[in-house]
Image (cartoon, rainbow, N blue to C red):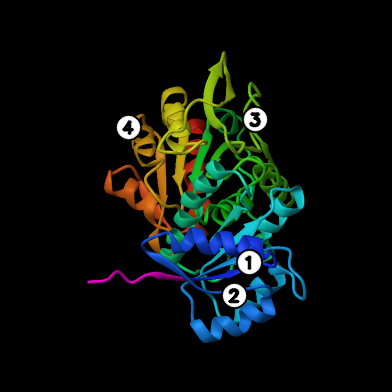
């Protein structure tokens, strides 16, 4: 029996990029380019004509900006979209905005003329398209709406609780919006938070800045050797592992470029394993939406070390892969929808604080 191929529409104003994308996609056994478009207005008609499974969409295009088109598309004809972005500050901001609007993922444009980089890019774009084809298109929950719902969440008001406890978060595809929804809902005196999100170098700084402007906690890229403070969240820089260690009574961040784990750097397993070793029962582990199994075994080791662990439920995941693997291992103390995740974290912290105050 012949395999049903993923049908892809490529939208880019560069004829060269369209040609490269077509060659890459058509070289895969399980996908095919059904059409290409030089701008969104052409793409709009091609969507109706070909009904593609996945669209790859450039950000900067004539006649209509890629983000404007994406917003209209997700409102009128929701479908899996992979953004193709230039590796620039403006490009990274646009890619993050696209994820907020409903795009499944993004890739940077390939460096043309370098055979090895094109071969590596071929594997990457094919993997992103496969994930997008299998992803769940979720209703948008905007930052403003989430902030309105959670703005009155009271602070924890327990200094010991804040300094002793830590929250560890791991995510991949769909994770930028899941992390945003979770962090935006947490009180400003939350324990220190460390985050491993699968994201390429050049994008995590914009991601941290965006979250910093939306949340009541401070959010930044992690810096090697800095102390992990309450009310702060630290994101692993793209291309670097993030680990926890201790220096006397303080928790401290380690940022390094050790080899990838589970094909990822940052790796969620690396972060979670360090939390199991250095924080034990004082840690909370959260694994969110994403493809693969990175973080599943690390979350299990956290739970075995006494940590409270949470996995995002299938219905609220863009891709249920990593949480599913963690749940199958028995790594999750609870399985929770993303919209309820912050409430469960805060409830656990409050119950811990009550136990501390009774002692």
Vertical placement of residue 327 versus 352, above or below: below
| Disc 3 residue crowd, few under 14, some 14–19, many 20+, Cα 10 Å | many
Q: In the displayed structure, does residue 293 sit left or right of residue 119?
A: left
Q: Is residue 4 magenta?
A: yes
Mark 1 or 3: in front is 1
Of the two numbered discs 2 and 4 on the same chain, state the one appearing first in sequence: 2
Main SS class of the magenta portion in the image: loop
Q: CA distance from mark 2 to mark 1?
A: 7 Å
Indicate which disc, 4 or 3, sits on the residue closer to the N terminus.
3
Asked if labels 1 and 2 touch by Cβ distance under 8 angstroms, the answer is yes
- Residue designated by label 3: 229
Say whether disc 1 or disc 3 marks the residue closer to the N-terminus. 1
User: Which residue is label 2 attached to?
Assistant: 74
Range drawn in magenta: 1-7
Which of pointers 4 and 1 indicates the residue nearer the eye? 1
Write the residue at 51% across / 55% down.
125
Q: Nearer the viewer, residue 334 or 276?
A: 276
Find residue 10 and report its image quarter: bottom right
List x then y, in percent, for residue 9: 54, 72
Which mark sits nearer the N-terminus, 2 or 1? Answer: 2
Where is residue 43 shown, x and y percent of the image? 62, 78
Mark 1: secondary structure: helix
CA neighbours of label 2 inside 10 A, class few (<14), some (14 to 19), many (20+): some
Q: Residue at x 44, y 66 (%)?
A: 133
């Amino acid at each position: 029996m012949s395999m049903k191929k993923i049908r892809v529409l490529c939208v880019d104003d560069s004829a060269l990029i369209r040609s490269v994308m077509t060659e890459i996609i058509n070289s895969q056994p399980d996908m095919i380019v059904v059409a290409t478009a030089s701008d969104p207005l052409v793409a709009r008609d091609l969507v109706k004509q070909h009904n593609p499974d996945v669209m790859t969409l450039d950000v900067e295009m004539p006649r209509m900006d890629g983000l404007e088109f994406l917003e209209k598309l997700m409102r009128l004809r929701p479908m899996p979209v992979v953004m193709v972005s230039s590796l620039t500050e403006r490009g990274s901001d646009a890619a993050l905005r696209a994820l907020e609007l409903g795009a499944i993922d993004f890739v940077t444009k390939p460096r043309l003329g370098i055979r090895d980089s094109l071969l590596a890019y071929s594997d990457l774009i094919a993997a992103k398209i496969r994930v997008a084809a299998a992803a769940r298109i979720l209703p948008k929950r905007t930052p403003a709406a989430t902030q309105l719902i959670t703005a009155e969440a009271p602070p924890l008001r327990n200094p010991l609780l804040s300094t002793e406890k830590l929250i560890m978060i791991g995510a991949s595809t769909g994770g930028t919006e899941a992390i945003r929804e979770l962090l935006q809902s947490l009180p400003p005196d939350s324990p220190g938070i460390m985050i491993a999100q699968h994201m390429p170098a050049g994008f995590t700084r914009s991601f941290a800045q965006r979250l910093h402007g939306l949340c009541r906690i401070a959010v930044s890229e992690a810096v090697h050797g800095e102390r992990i403070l309450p009310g702060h969240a630290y994101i692993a820089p793209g291309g670097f592992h993030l680990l926890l260690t201790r220096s006397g009574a303080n928790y401290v961040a380690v940022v390094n470029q050790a080899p990838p784990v589970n094909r990822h750097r940052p790796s969620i397993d690396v972060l979670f394993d360090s939390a199991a070793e250095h924080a034990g029962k004082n840690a909370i582990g959260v694994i969110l939406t994403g493809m693969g199994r990175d973080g599943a075994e690390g979350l299990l080791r956290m739970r075995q070390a006494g940590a409270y662990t949470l996995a995002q439920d299938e219905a609220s995941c863009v891709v249920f892969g990593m949480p599913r693997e963690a749940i199958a291992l028995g790594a999750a103390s609870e399985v929770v929808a993303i919209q309820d995740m912050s409430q469960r974290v805060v409830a656990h912290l409050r119950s811990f604080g009550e136990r501390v105050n009774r002692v």
